Image: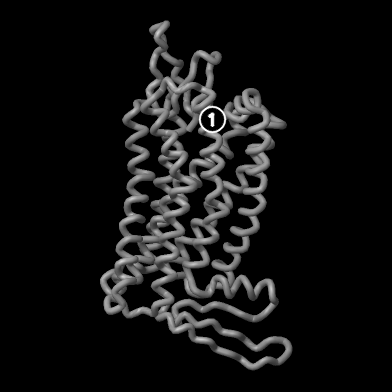
Amino acid sequence: MPSASLAGPSTTVAPNATARPTPRTNSSVPDIPLFHLFARLDEELHVGFPGLWLALMAVHGAIFLVGLVLNGLALYVFCCRTQAKTPSVMYTINLVVTDLLVGLSLPTRFAVFYGTRGCLRCAFPHVFGYFLNMHCSILFLTCICVDRYLAIVRPDGSRRWRQPACARVVCALVWLAAGAVTLSVLSVEAGGAPCCRVLALTVLEFLLPLLVISVFTGRMVCALSRPGLLRQGRQRRVRAVQLLLTVLAIFLVCFTPFHARQVVVALWPDLPHHTSLVAYHVAVTLSSLNSCMDPIVYCFVTSGFQATVRSLFHRRGVEYEPGIGDTVIMHKSAKGLPTLTQALANGPEA
């Protein structure tokens, strides 16, 4: 959430932070929604740092193309080529949708800047899509990690909660919660948002999920070091640890800079405006990068994802059927090759 100029370079707002009066006057920044400030950020960066603006726009264009291809392919695999919709698959499908949303919001950003600059309604899809994607991505990545931990370490005790019906309810709650938080943040008045609100949001939407993922990653590593604790195959356990470590890396690379910048601006609202502006745009770019890094997570959600993707490019009849011993089934091809069933001996895919 940005710091933006309202009347000139001497009047700045720290997003989600209290707009304090300048030492020279007793007047505070006018109370306007933060969304009005977000809509002006590209123009501010273009005016102040045109070279950086061009570089970041090029990066966002690459993120859009790569994310659209990877997430579009993943959505097809999980929706059309994966037969059993386990909780992990359902959370992953919703994560793919959020990544596609942020990717599709980038062309809107370019169109607004070049064609309808200053139009607040035109800027809303991009701003709303960005924050909704960030909140949903954090929550769905946390759901995937918790589900993998329960499936590997607590398979018996968690079976009741790891049902498709429960997963659908969780997904609906995530979308509702993320949408409500996003709309509430965009409607916050820049001149009256207290510093404590920034810290509270940072703890709830970032630090708490990061703590959950870190704790579960540590416990999973400990469980991996004790083979007698788990009945599943070693390969499946290693894949679960790789998934948690990948999610942890995405949190640190994509989401930490944005939330760190938010806390810094909230605690030090007198930070120079140009520094806050550049930090915001760099943090937003790193946050958008999660749409290109999340496909790495998809490779560890099910053991057959990579095999199914390879089959699409090699035009082979490989189809993954999770829930039946992690088996990859090679159907009879057009050349009359015999049917081959290869058991991966990883235990049942939960």
Q: Which x, y percent locates residue 190?
A: 44, 24
Rendered view: 329 above or below 172: below
Residue at image mark 1: 38
Closest to the observer: 265 or 32? 265
The quadrant the C terminus occupies is bottom left
Rendered view: 155 above or below 200: below
Q: Residues within 10 Å of mark 1 (few under 14, many from 20)?
A: many
Q: Quadrant of residue 77?
A: bottom right
Left or right? Give the position of 332 relative to 170.
right
Inspect this view and state whether residue 159 appears.
Answer: no
Residue at 40% across, 20% down: 19
Closest to the observer: 228 or 330? 228
Q: Quadrant of residue 57?
A: top right
Closest to the observer: 230 or 106? 230
Inspect this view and state whether residue 223 appears.
Answer: yes
Left or right? Give the position of 113 relative to 195.
right
Residue at 50% across, 82% down: 327
Say what secondary structure mark 1 lies in: helix
Q: Which amino acid, mark 1?
A: Phe
Q: Which x, y percent locates residue 35?
A: 51, 30
Rendered view: 211 above or below 245: above
Closest to the observer: 203 or 246? 246
